[in-house]
Amino acid sequence: MAGESAHFGDRAVVIGGSMTGMMVARVLVDHFARVTVLERDEIASGPEPRRYTPQGNHYHALLVGGQRVLEDLYPGFTRRLEERGAVAVASGHDTAGYGPPGIGEASKGSEEPARDTGLRFYNQSRALLEDNLRHFHRTQEAITDRSPATARRLLSEDGRVCGVEIESDGETERLEADLVVDAGGRAAQSPRWLESMGCSTPEETTIGVDFAYSSALFRLPADLGIREKLATFGGPPPTYPNAAISGAIEDGQWVVSLAGRFGDYPPGDEEGFLAFAKALPTPVLYERLKHAERVGPIHRFRFPTSVHRRYERLRDFPSGLIVIGDAICSVNPAYGQGMSACALQVRALSDLLAQRSANGSGLDDLAPEFFARTAEVIVTPWTLAANMDLAYPKTVGERPADMAEGARYFGELAALSAEDEQVGLLLAEVFQLVRPLSVLMEEPLLGRVMRRLEAKAGPAQPVANPDTQKEQR
Ligand SMILES: Cc1cc2nc3c(=O)[nH]c(=O)nc-3n(C[C@H](O)[C@H](O)[C@H](O)COP(=O)(O)OP(=O)(O)OC[C@H]3O[C@@H](n4cnc5c(N)ncnc54)[C@H](O)[C@@H]3O)c2cc1C
């Protein structure tokens, strides 16, 4: 149980007290006597939006992959989340995709509920989710939350990271640590700090998605008869770059996020917001918003690039430090994967520390092993998002040589999933980050899809499995 064993040292310091930082603290408290979490933001005593996580003003789904990790880390987490108003969404049954007239989508909308896959993900405000995690910290003597406290630089000795210099209340302080974990998010400073220590910095793979959200909270009249708890409004790429999502969250509210790309960004004023909704490929959202009461300001967010920092390729990383979460990989938020991708990285860390604890191997060479494992975890969300984004010609990024074959394969797989419930479930599990993408390219499924393609258009090229493509991406 938390705090019982101190196998790896006296203190670990976590930079960043957001989703990843808190999950990391939960894992480390089993292996260190004390864990100090540094957060530069003011932390409220309840679920409040924070300055340094402005993404919290936008739709935030907790996919099944992330929810399962959180439930493992914090038994009872899901029940508490539901008790506080988070909305469970039965994937397939409670979801609807509204598209342009004549273009079918996976789920058909209000009149015709699609089948229930049995998978439950969650809609809630990001603030509620964070507060649910922070609840655990408050029960743990071994975890100290320092906020506002900003990590300014790493302390090092003989090429090893041995702590952090922090700034808090205008004072500078040195915190010694046996392990420092940088969970500072997309803007994490580790690359800069590594450079100042004379170490190599990670290469970055980027995809210029040029994506933007405008979001607001609404109350929708009950007599609109909305069956679903989550709806998307848009059309298939590359014809329809603009879209929207609406999700029921706590306190009877709906969060509505409008999404645009390539300079056609959703506006931040009421009139422009409605006009953007009206111009979507389907009128359904606009018809709803006409009757809705907006109960909060309109927030905007620009997301220029997905970024993957390739820490797993570094050969001279200092010991005493690891980097995790969005600090490694920050993907286009359109697909709702970010927090779950972070949770999967935290699970990789948890498994690794448990193994090392069991075999007594300590923290030596922790970073290379950890980064290799996170790279495996990141392949699925990164490839899924990249493939969908790269379908738009204006997206800037290296397109895989087999992109056209991959698109044909996935198109046929989607068609098969509509006919075969088991394939539909497998596909949903991959998109919910419960299973790796590679399961969609394994036999016997691979053969079934290839035979369908061949029957349609003659022999097709084999599709590369993402597991064997890792090093090329
Ligand atoms: C518009 C938008 C919508 C999104 N929607 C979804 C969604 O639907 N589902 C989903 O799963 N994900 C979504 N995401 C992604 C999700 O928000 C991120 O993946 C997630 O927040 C990453 O968590 P993190 O803890 O790694 O980083 P962050 O949440 O960014 O937190 C980093 C923290 O570190 C702190 N920090 C940074 N540097 C320092 C320092 N030097 N000292 C002290 N503190 C520091 C920051 O203040 C911050 O609190 C969305 C993202 C965006 C932008």
Image: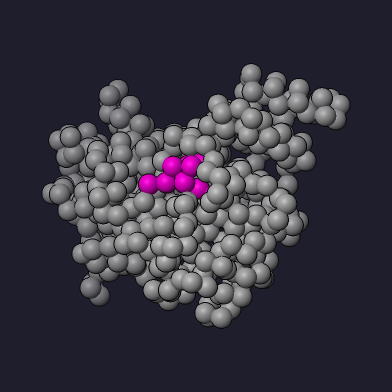
Asked if the stretch drawn in magenta spans residue 252, the answer is no
Identify the magenta region.
88-96
Say which of 431 and 27 sits in front.
431
Taking the image as shown, residue 185 lies to the left or right of residue 357, namely: right
Say which of 366 and 390 sits in front.
390
Give the image location of residue 98, x and y in percent: 60, 54
Taking the image as shown, residue 266 lies to the left or right of residue 187, namely: right
In the displayed image of the protein, which residue is found farthest to the right? Answer: 458
Quick one: quadrant of the N terminus?
top left
* Vertical side of 465 occupied by 85: above or below: below
Quick one: quadrant of the C terminus?
top right
Taking the image as shown, residue 289 lies to the left or right of residue 461, namely: left
* Vertical side of 453 occupied by 104: above or below: below
Give the image location of residue 22, x and y in percent: 30, 51
Residue 449 location, quadrant: top right
Say which of 248 and 34 sits in front.
248
Look at the image and tell me whether residue 134 can be seen: yes
Give the image location of residue 195, x and y in percent: 49, 57
Asked if the stretch drawn in magenta spans residue 94, the answer is yes
Residue drawn at point x = 77 percent, y = 40 percent: 404
